[in-house]
Image: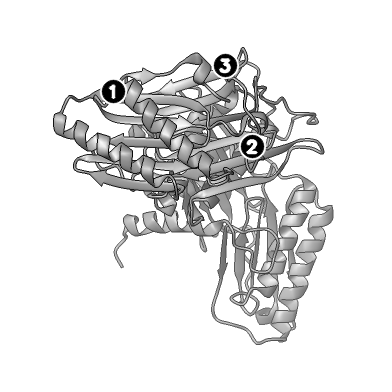
Amino acid sequence: MAWNPWKFFFLCIIFFHLAIGKTKGANLPYLALDCSDPRISDNSPHQTNIRTLLSSLSSNATSNANGFYNNTIFGTDFLDTAYGLFMCRGDVLPDACKYCVANATHTLSTDTNCFLSEMGVIWYEDCMVRYSNFSFFTRVNRFPARWMCNTAFVSSDPLNFMSLLDNTLQEIVTETANSTNRYFTKQENLPDFQTLYCLGQCTQDLSFERCHDCLNHAREDIPTFSFGKQGGRVLYSSCTIRYELYPFYRLTDEGPKGLVPETHYTNRDSEYSEDPGYIFLNCSNNKIDADFISNLRTLLFDLSSNATSKSGFQTQEGTAYGLFRCRIDIDPPHLCEQCIKNATDKITSECGLAYAEAVIWYNHCWLRYSDRNFFSTAETIPRFRNLNISNSSIQYSVASELSNQLAKVANMTGDTDNKFLTDESLKLNDEQTVFILGQCSSDLSSGGCSGCLSDMIGTAIPWRSLGSVGGRVMYPSCILRFELFRFYNLTPTTPSAPLPPSPGFSISIHHDSHASKRKDNDIYP
C-alpha cells in the first residue's frame, strides 16, 4: 500500500479527540490502547501468567522509585511465558505513578478487547504499560504506535516554527538518550511571551544508541503528523516525544507549593452578577453601503428579537451575517435578552452601522456580525485578554497543573452538545480550587471548538509571565475563563457601578489595526 500522510494526519486528529474520556472500567482516562490478535484461551496457563505479570507490575509500582520496572513470568514452555514492563513519565510523583499503573493493569486485565490478547500496550498521560508473549526488553519497538495532534494551528510562519521545533527536538533526542533515566525536557522561549515545551522519554532498558534511534524516528514523524500544529506527540512502544505551547510537564526540582497568588479584582461576579457587564467592542473595515446598512439594521433586530427564547442564534440578511451566544449558566434567563439588547444598542451607537464587521463581548454574552460568511469557522482575531502579566510568574508546577486542566476543558467543551462546559476538579491545595468555564459559538464543530479554545491556551496565555491564577480570554468564536472563586451559576444580586481593573492587571487587545471602542469604566473583570 502506498504511504498516505494525509490519512495519518486525520487519524492523528481522530486519536486526539477520542483519547480523552475513555475509562473502560477504570477511573483514569487513557490516551490509547492496542491489543493484538490472535487470542488465547480463557483460564489457560498463558492467561494466568499474563494476569500474574500485570499484578506484579502494579505491585512494584508501589515501591518503585525510578518509574520503571520490567518482569518475566515463565511458563512451562516459551509459548506460555509473559514479558511486561511499565514506564511512568519522568516528572510523575510516586503516588501518581502507582495510581496510573494500577489503572493500566486493570484495564488490560478487564477490557473486552484485551483480556484474551497475547500482547497489549496502553498509554496514559502519566504512564505506559506493555506486555507480550515474546521478550522485547532492550529492543526498539516502534509499533504499536499512536500519533496525536493539538487541534490548534500556529498562527504565523509555520515553516520557521517547525524549523525551531526540529532543532529543539534534536537536542531532546540526544539529551534523553544520554540521561540515566532516559528522560529529558526543554523549554525554548518564543516571540510574544510564548514558550515551546518539549519532552522525550525512552524505556530505561534501552541503550544510548537504541534510545537515540527510537526518538529520532519519532522526531522525524512530527512534521508528517503535526505540521503547523501548536502541539503534537508520538507514542511508540519504546519511547515517546511531545511538544506543546503550554507547560504540560512538571519540573522535578521545585520546592513545596504553598497558597497560589490569586488575581484580585475591584469587584466580582458573585457581587455583580445581574449586570451583563460590557467588556469590549471591536469595529473594523469601514464600509459605507446603503444596502448593507439596511441589511445590518434588520440583522441586529432579528438577533435581539431571538434572544427572548434562545441562548444562541445565527442568521443572515442579504450580505450581512450575524450571531449571538449567551452563557448558558446565567439565571434568570432574561439576562440573556437584556445582554443582547445592550449589545445591539451599543454596536449601533458606537459603530454607527458604518463598519463591515464588529464583535462585542459582555460578561454574559457576545455578539458579532460581518459582511462575509464566518459561520462554522473558528476565528481568533480580534481578541481580548484580561490576565495578570508580571515579571514574577506563578510557580511552574501550578502553571503545569492549570494548563493541563485548561487543555482538558478545551477538548471536553468541543464534545458537549451545547459547546459549553464548567469545571472545578482542579484542587491546587486544601484551600484553593480552580473554577473554569469554556464556551464556543454553537455553529462550530467539535474540532473547531476545541481548536479555538486550544489556541487560547497556547498563544493567548503567556505562561512564563502569568503572575497569578485568574483571568479570561475572548475570541470571536469562543471564550475561556478561570478563577480561584466561583463566577458561574450565581444567584443574582443588585449591582453597583463598575470599576476599572486593579493596578498591575494587564488588559491586552489584539485586532487588525481597525477601529476599537472601549471605555475604561466599561471593562469588567
Please, what secondary structure does the residue beneath circle 1 have? loop
- Looking at the picture, tell me which residue is in the foreground, 437 or 331: 331
Q: Looking at this view, name the residue that lies furthest to the right.
A: 63
| Circle 1 residue | 352
Say which mark, if any, is on residue 142.
none
Decide if residue 87 is on the left or right side of residue 476. right
Discs 1/3, front: 1
Relative to 287, residue 42 above or below = below
Q: Quadrant of the C terminus?
A: top right
| Circle 3 residue | 500
Relative to 109, residue 506 above or below = above
Do residues under tags 1 and 3 come within 8 Å of each other at their CB atoms?
Answer: no
Going by the numbered disc 1, the residue's amino acid type is: Gly
| Circle 2 residue | 492
Q: Position of residue 485 (x, y in %)?
A: 70, 34
Going by the numbered disc 3, the residue's amino acid type is: Pro
- Looking at the picture, tell me which residue is in the foreground, 251 or 25: 25
- Looking at the picture, tell me which residue is in the foreground, 389 or 85: 389
What residue is at 55 percent from the left and 81 percent from the top? Answer: 38
Do residues under tags 1 and 2 come within 8 Å of each other at their CB atoms?
Answer: no
Distance Cα–Cα, label 3 vs label 2: 21 Å
What residue is at 32 percent from the left and 60 percent from the top? Answer: 3
Label 3 Cα neighbours within 10 Å, binned few <14 / some 14-19 / many ≥20? some
Label 1 Cα neighbours within 10 Å, binned few <14 / some 14-19 / many ≥20? few
Relative to 82, residue 382 above or below = above
